[in-house]
Amino acid sequence: MRNFDEPFLIEFPKLGNSHLGYISVSEKENLPFVPKRIYWTYYTPEEVERGGHSHYDLQQILVAVAGKIIVTTELLNGEKQEFILEKPNIGLFIPKMCWRTMKYNHNAVQMCIASLEYDEKDYIRDYEKFLEKK
Ligand code: T46
């Protein structure tokens, strides 16, 4: 049984071949939540670190649909991990209450599949406040 309290990689089906190109697809039955929102970030300068926050309730799947993204995660139990996303058919599940940072290479496009609508009140943007939730 999958533990939805910690980050994990999801391998999406990859159909096609090198002559035709590829398509990856996921039906909602194969996702850890029913998506409510999708957004994407791009042209992030290489020296910029995004993220630096946690969410109270939001769950997400990050996919590097182009380029390379280095994601660090930290759980309230102190467990820290680093993930390198560079394959368009691989997603990273990020649970609620997980501090994360992201660094991008120059051509990276990050797609985020989110379990909830945007709500600034769901963010913890202060690291000390995040640690207080232990
Ligand atoms: C996350 C990581 C992976 C909106 O108005 N609506 C939205 O749906 C989103 C996602 C953002 N915004 C606004 C809020 C800020 O003024 O866009 C601006 C940039 O957002 P933020 O600084 O939170 O961007 P990131 O890249 O640090 O974080 C984003 C998501 O906000 C966050 O949920 O986990 O991507």
Image (cartoon, rainbow, N blue to C red):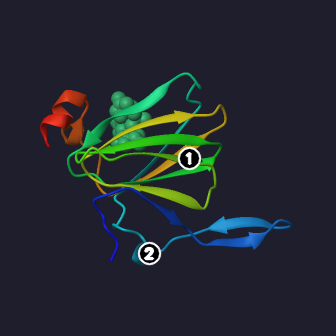
Q: What residue type is labelled 2?
A: Asn
User: How many numbered marks are there?
Assistant: 2
Which residue is label 1 attached to?
A: 84
Q: Name the side, left or right, on which 19 lies relative to 50.
A: right
Q: In which quarter of the image is ligand 1?
A: top left
Residue 38: horizontal and vertical position, in percent? 43, 52
Specify the label residue 30 is tagged with: 2
Task: Give, as a three-letter code, the residue at label 1.
Answer: Ile
Q: Where is residue 101 in the image (x, y as percent from the top left)?
A: 41, 36
Label 1–label 2 contact, CB within 8 A: no
Is 102 drawn above or below residue 36 in the view shown? above
Element assignment for label 1: strand
Quick check: 115 left or right of 86?
Answer: left
Q: Is residue 125 above or below residue 87?
A: above
Against 121, is 61 above or below?
below
Classify the position of the N terminus by image quarter.
bottom left
Foreground tag (1 vs 2): 1
In the rendered image, residue 58, in percent from the top left (x then y), is placed at 27, 51
